[in-house]
Image (cartoon, rainbow, N blue to C red):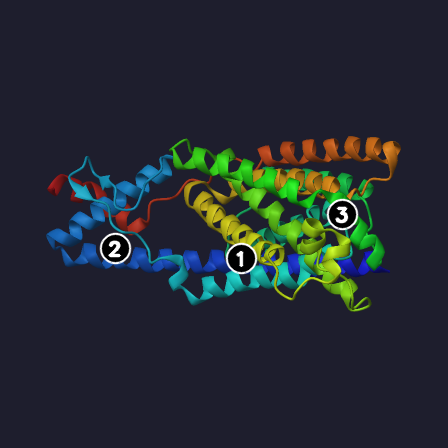
């Protein structure tokens, strides 16, 4: 019964997340339309400032259409004119903020609850539901076209997810207080999190030195997402079991002090503060680097690769922390099917990798050549 409760929570949570992502996309499209209308108005004024900004905007859009990256405020048009600032920041849109709130509501009320009943190896692949809901809503409500190649790619990805779900561990790792405490003690939580933070620090340092690539952003976002999943699983399992076992010690105290000392720990301890801090840093870090990646790469490039990487890192970390595999036979079957599933997800992602070109707005396209000649 608990398996189906967790499964329902994960599916419903990801439906909400997919709707939130579609709402964010709608908000960004609206900000872009407003900006296009402003550029059209500037063209009509005929002023030198308006014409210069329109030329800069047209040049920037042309570069984006060719696949080149354009930074806000960077020179455009051969360095003669500073590029227009672009649409308003996304966080100024109430609809975008509402979509972001729906994302986190789906995570908190859906995936977090599911993690208290299910393995991360089950919850992480179910994230494909959010991707599919987003695609369907974007096609029906935003008028986005999904090509036959992309449909095939999504079908292959779903097949890969099904391979993983068929052999994934069903339980959460512990069903009572004693089992939970033993699981946390045996998990090596401190060592695993120290290793994850060391890897993360190295990846962020590489990004900050200017060696930026899609796969670096994917790796950083996937590791941050994995850390938030592990903390969410520990805390939601703890809260669920504590309803039945009031004396259950906090998992952070158990991991640092041991089960005996954790029972008599104070209400506020350093391990508990660090656990909450780790959760906050993970959530903010994942969202920050995910948004940076989406600002540099098309969503059809970033999202499938991130989904595959996140599944690999989150699933393997969960298996290491919570010892969810039942013997060598189960491990052999799981890793065989898991490898096949990830291979299918990677293969399906190839059909989604072609970036959609950014079309030049019609009002800019009609006047661009005359404007350039008049400069």
**Residue 370 in picture, x, y percent from top left:** 17, 43
Is residue 206 visible to the viewer in this orientation of the structure? yes
Q: Which label sits in the foreground, 1 or 2?
A: 1
Label 2 residue SS: helix
Query: Which label's residue is closer to the chain start, 3 or 1?
Result: 1
Mark 2 crowdedness (10 Å alpha carbons): few <14, some 14-19, many ≥20 = many
Mark 1 crowdedness (10 Å alpha carbons): few <14, some 14-19, many ≥20 = many
Find residue 375 and report its image quarter: top left
Query: In this rendering, would 172 be left or right of 125?
Result: right
Q: Residue at x 39, y 43 (%)?
A: 358
Q: Which label sits in the foreground, 3 or 1?
A: 3
Q: Which residue, given by chain and number where applicable, does mark 2 sit on?
A: 39
Proximity of marks 3 and 1: CB atoms separated by less than 8 Å: no
Q: Distance between the residues labelled 1 and 2?
A: 26 Å
Label 3 residue SS: helix
**306 or 201: nearer the eye?**
201
Q: Which residue, given by chain and number where applicable, does mark 1 sit on?
A: 22
Q: Residue at x 14, y 53 (%)?
A: 49
Query: Which label's residue is closer to the chain start, 3 or 2?
Result: 2
Label 1 residue SS: helix
Q: How far apart are marks 3 and 1 (CA)?
A: 41 Å
Query: Which label's residue is closer to the chain start, 1 or 2?
Result: 1
Q: Which residue, given by chain and number where applicable, does mark 3 sit on?
A: 185
Q: Residue at x 17, y 40 (%)?
A: 372
Is residue 173 visible to the viewer in this orientation of the structure? no
Query: In this rendering, would 49 be left or right of 143?
Result: left
**66 or 262: nearer the eye?**
262
């Amino acid at each position: 019964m608990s398996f189906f409760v967790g499964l329902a929570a994960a599916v419903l949570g990801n439906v909400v997340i997919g709707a939130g992502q579609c709402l964010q996309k709608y908000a960004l499209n609206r900000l872009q339309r407003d900006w296009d209308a402003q550029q059209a108005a500037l063209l009509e004024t005929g002023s030198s400032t308006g014409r210069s900004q329109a030329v800069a905007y047209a040049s920037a859009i042309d570069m984006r259409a060719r696949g080149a990256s354009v930074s806000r405020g960077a020179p455009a048009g051969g360095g003669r004119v500073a590029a227009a600032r672009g649409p308003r920041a996304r966080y100024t849109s109430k609809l975008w903020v509402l979509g972001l709130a729906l994302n986190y509501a789906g995570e908190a009320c859906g995936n977090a609850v599911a993690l208290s009943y299910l393995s991360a190896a089950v919850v992480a692949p179910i994230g494909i539901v959010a991707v599919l809901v987003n695609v369907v809503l974007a096609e029906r409500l935003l008028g986005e076209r999904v090509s036959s190649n992309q449909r095939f790619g999504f079908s292959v990805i779903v097949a890969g997810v099904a391979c993983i779900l068929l052999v994934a561990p069903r339980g959460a790792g512990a069903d009572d207080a004693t089992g939970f405490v033993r699981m946390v003690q045996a998990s090596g939580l401190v060592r695993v999190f120290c290793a994850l933070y060391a890897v993360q620090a190295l990846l962020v340092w590489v990004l900050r030195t200017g060696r930026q690539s899609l796969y670096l952003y994917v790796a950083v976002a996937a590791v941050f997402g994995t850390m938030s999943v592990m903390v969410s699983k520990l805390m939601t399992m703890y809260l669920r079991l504590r309803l039945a076992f009031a004396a259950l010690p906090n998992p952070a105290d158990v991991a640092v002090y041991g089960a005996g000392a954790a029972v008599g720990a104070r209400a506020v301890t350093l391990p508990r503060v660090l656990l909450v801090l780790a959760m906050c840093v993970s959530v903010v870090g994942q969202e920050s680097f995910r948004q940076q990646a989406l600002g540099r790469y098309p969503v059809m490039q970033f999202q499938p690769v991130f989904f595959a990487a996140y599944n690999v890192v989150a699933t393997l970390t969960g298996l290491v922390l919570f010892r969810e595999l039942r013997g060598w036979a189960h491990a052999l079957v799981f890793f065989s099917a898991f490898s096949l599933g990830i291979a299918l997800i990677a293969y399906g992602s190839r059909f989604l990798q072609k970036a959609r070109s950014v079309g030049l707005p019609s009002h800019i396209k009609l006047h661009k050549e005359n404007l350039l000649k008049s400069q």
